[in-house]
Image: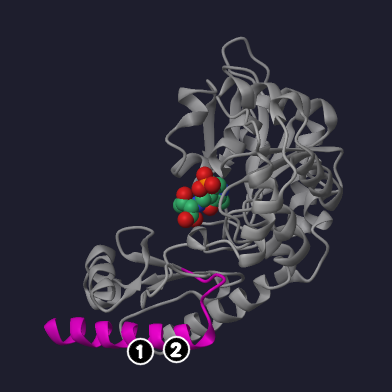
Amino acid sequence: MTQARGSNIIDLRSDTVTLPTEEMLEAIRNAELGDDVYREDPTVNRLEEMAAKKMGKEAALLVPSGTMANLVSLMSNTKRGDCVILEAESHIYWYEVGGLSAIAGLIPWPIRGHMGALDPQDVEAAIRPKNIHFPETTLVCIENTHNRAGGTIITPQQIEALSRVTKKYGLKLYMDGARIFNAAVALKVDVREFTRHVDNLMFCLSKGLSCPIGSVIVGDSEFIERARKIRKMLGGGMRQAGIIAAPGIIALEKMIDRLEEDHRNARLLAEGITKIDGLYVDLRRVQTNIVLIDVSGLGVNSETFIAKLRERGLLASNHSKTIVRMVTHRGIEKEHIERALTIIEEVAKELRVKR
Ligand code: TLP
């Protein structure tokens, strides 16, 4: 099962639309269950052990969503009133309903990155000095791959350079690794290369890895203990959560390597689009499974462009006024990309004629 049955639609809005595999559904049916608030769900325990090991950290915690993973992690790394440095286009800052301020009581200190990557010098300059008037800076957040920058990879070297700054000032370094396996697969390195220099991170099971629900927070045991308590406080303590963990185990065992196919398809899509008059894709940013298309050359906004694509059965999402986002994922094959390119070309032609 990859898309809603009988559907002819090509859905490139996000990799969150992936449906579970038959094997995942079977695993859910057969999962050994218990009450996870009592830590008695063997399937959850197994997933958390696997995740911690894979990431080279001591412990892990299953949470329902990436947004909750980020919020729980922010709260476990800081205290109310602290200042958090993050990238100005990061998911935490853009898309999480301001939870970091509204719930965690934190002050965001956004810095503009370069293709999603924070410059260590900019971070160092943004740390609030010790002063009676200032909030205390205690955390730096990075995002990998960086969603709004176009799925760009923050390399292990870039992370290490940032960690030198955070260590120097005694700050924590956290990674929103919702798509960290995309980064690892794209660079053909072990995921631990990316996790080694951060204190803790989260990754999502429910994006390219195709699970129906779930994200995992990973870090040292003390941090995860705090996170477990905060998850409970936020209402995220789950009971027979093995039904979520069971497909997660399959994801970690079997769904990582295939992300390469999504990257190949994204590349194919991006290169095809660059040949269409009036559309622009910055190919340097197409490093994983996201393609950002600038439609301003057609003299229309993203909304109009997306509506036209939709009429022809192609779904895309709105990144900004003139940028449309397309994301490849399991269930999208080369043939879908070819069909998508035909649709995009037709729409571009129609809009060019109207100008
Ligand atoms: N991103 C979604 C939307 O919310 C924009 C998407 O379609 O890309 N971190 C990153 C980097 C993400 O891209 C997302 C989801 C999250 C966190 C939040 O995950 P969920 O949706 O599980 O709360």
**x%, y% of residue 138?**
68, 26
Give the overall secondary structure of the magenta segment: helix
Q: Residue at x 52, y 20 (%)?
A: 105
- In contact (CB < 8 Å): disc 1 and disc 2: yes
Quadrant position of residue 201: top right
Q: Is residue 353 magenta?
A: yes
Task: Identify the secondary structure beneath mark 2.
Answer: helix
Front residue of this view, candidates 129 and 204: 204
Residue highlighted by disc 1: 342
Relative to residue 39, is residue 344 drawn left or right? left
Relative to residue 301, is residue 237 drawn left or right? right
Q: Residue at x 68, y 26 (%)?
A: 76
Residue highlighted by disc 2: 338
- Please provide the residue range marked out in magenta: 327-355
What is the CA distance from the residue labelled 1 to the residue labelled 2? 6 Å
Quadrant position of residue 293: bottom left
**x%, y% of residue 220?**
83, 33
Q: Is residue 92 magenta?
A: no
Task: Identify the secondary structure beneath mark 1.
Answer: helix
**Which quadrant is the C terminus positioned in?**
bottom left
Which residue reaches farthest front? 30
Q: Residue at x 19, y 85 (%)?
A: 350
Q: Give the label on residue 73, or none.
A: none
